[in-house]
């Protein structure tokens, strides 16, 4: 009997231990499943962020190339503008010089016309005297 009672207690203790281990195993399996799911989500997010990062780096490189090209174009345009300004200044100077020459010629023409009128008037008077 004592043996039977000890056997029953041992079986009861082993049964309780098995139930506890089963519950503990279920909890661990559930937690492990959750951890795996979280790890997969984290890995997916990391891959997405890495792809975005690569995309942004390519876009950054593209923008930097465009900036370099636009900067070079700007410098070329500035140089061309300076050349145009110099050319315009030269043309303005030439225009002023030509206007000055035209004014001198106009004054000289007016003076010559006046002299011609006087000469014609003198010539007409002399012819009347003869």
Image (tube, rainbow, N blue to C red):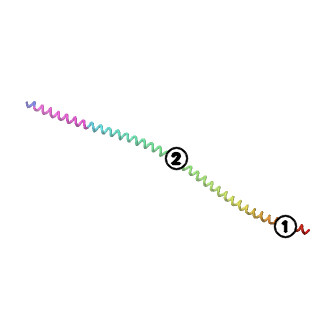
Q: Position of residue 122 (x, y in %)?
A: 85, 68
- Toward the left, the furthest residue is 1
Residue corresponding to mark 2: 66
33 and 75: which is toward the camera? 33
Residue 117 sits in quarter: bottom right
Q: Does the magenta portion include 15? A: yes
90 and 129: which is toward the camera? 129
Looking at the image, which residue is at 71% across and 62% down?
Answer: 100
Q: Position of residue 39 (x, y in %)?
A: 33, 39
Determine crowd level at label 1: few under 14, some 14-19, many 20+ residues with C-alpha closer than 10 A.
Answer: few
Looking at the image, which residue is at 15% across and 34% down?
Answer: 13
Q: Position of residue 118 (x, y in %)?
A: 83, 67
Looking at the image, which residue is at 22% across and 34% down?
Answer: 22
Q: Position of residue 60 (x, y in %)?
A: 47, 46
Which stretch appears magenta? Answer: 5-27
Residue corresponding to mark 1: 121
Q: Is residue 112 left or right of residue 58?
A: right
Disc tally is 2
Determine crowd level at label 2: few under 14, some 14-19, many 20+ residues with C-alpha closer than 10 A.
Answer: few
Pointer 2 or 1: first along the chain: 2
| Whether residue 73 is situated above or below residue 100 in the rendered picture | above
Label pair 2/1, CB-CB below 8 angstroms: no
- Toward the right, the furthest residue is 130
Mark nearer the viewer, 2 or 1: 1
Q: Does the magenta portion include 25? A: yes
Q: Where's the N terminus, which quadrant?
A: top left
Q: Main secondary structure of the magenta part?
A: helix
| Whether residue 41 is situated above or below residue 110 in the rendered picture | above
């Amino acid at each position: 009997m004592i043996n039977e009672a000890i056997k029953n207690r041992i079986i009861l203790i082993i049964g309780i231990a098995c139930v506890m281990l089963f519950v503990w195993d279920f909890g661990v399996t559930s937690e492990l499943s959750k951890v795996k799911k979280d790890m997969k989500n984290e890995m997916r997010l990391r891959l997405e962020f890495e792809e975005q990062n690569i995309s942004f780096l390519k876009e950054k490189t593209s923008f930097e190339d465009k900036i370099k090209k636009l900067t070079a174009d700007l410098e070329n345009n500035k140089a061309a503008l300076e050349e145009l300004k110099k050319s315009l200044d030269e043309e303005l100077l030439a225009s002023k010089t030509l206007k000055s020459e035209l004014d001198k010629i106009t004054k000289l023409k007016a003076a010559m016309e006046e002299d011609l009128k006087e000469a014609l008037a003198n010539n007409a008077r002399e012819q009347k005297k003869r």
